[in-house]
């Protein structure tokens, strides 16, 4: 079992992978953190260029096209 923790989305995230291969486990951990980082980029309301910020800027003004990931979460 392999486990790694990082701070993402302003909180501690821990990913645990069960594998016989350290290399495969590390690849899975990196892929998981890559997905979390992608969502952080889309959903960070402190970042002016995030999709959430664009939605907020245009609320009541005009529709905003967002990614499938953002739409699925909303």
Image: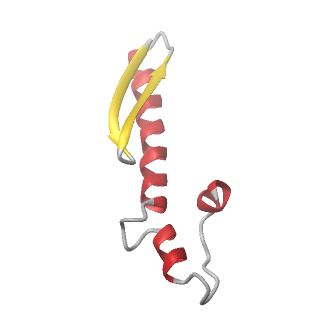
58 sits left or right of 14 in the view = right
Residue 69 in the image, given as x and y percentages of width and height: 60, 57
* Residue ID at (63%, 54%): 73
- Quadrant holding the N terminus: top left
Quarter placement of the C terminus: bottom right
Colour setting: secondary structure
Looking at the image, the residue that sits furthest to the bottom is: 61
Tell me the residue at 42%/59% (across/down): 41
* Residue 24 rendering spot, x and y as whole percentages: 45, 22
Is 72 on the left or on the right of 15, as rendered?
right
Image quadrant where residue 14 sits: top left
The location of residue 43, given as percent across then percent down, is 48, 60
* Residue 26 vs residue 42, the one in the foreground: 42
In the displayed structure, would residue 74 be above or below residue 62?
Answer: above
Q: Quadrant of residue 55?
A: bottom right
Q: Residue furthest front?
A: 60
40 sits left or right of 62 in the view = left
Nearer-the-camera pick, 42 or 53: 53
Q: Quadrant of residue 29?
A: top left
How many numbered marks have been drawn onto this rendered protein structure?
A: 0
Task: Report the residue at 60% width, 70% height from top.
Answer: 66
- Look at 39% across and 26% down and name the residue there: 26
Q: Position of residue 20 (x, y in %)?
A: 47, 9
Query: In the picture shown, does residue 11 fall above or below 17?
Result: below
């Amino acid at each position: 079992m392999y486990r790694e923790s990082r701070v993402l989305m302003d909180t501690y995230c821990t990913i645990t992978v069960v594998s016989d291969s350290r290399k495969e486990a590390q690849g899975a951990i990196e892929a998981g953190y890559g997905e979390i980082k992608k969502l952080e980029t889309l959903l960070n309301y402190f970042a002016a260029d995030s999709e959430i910020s664009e939605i907020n800027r245009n609320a009541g003004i005009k529709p905003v096209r967002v990614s499938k990931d953002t739409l699925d979460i909303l």
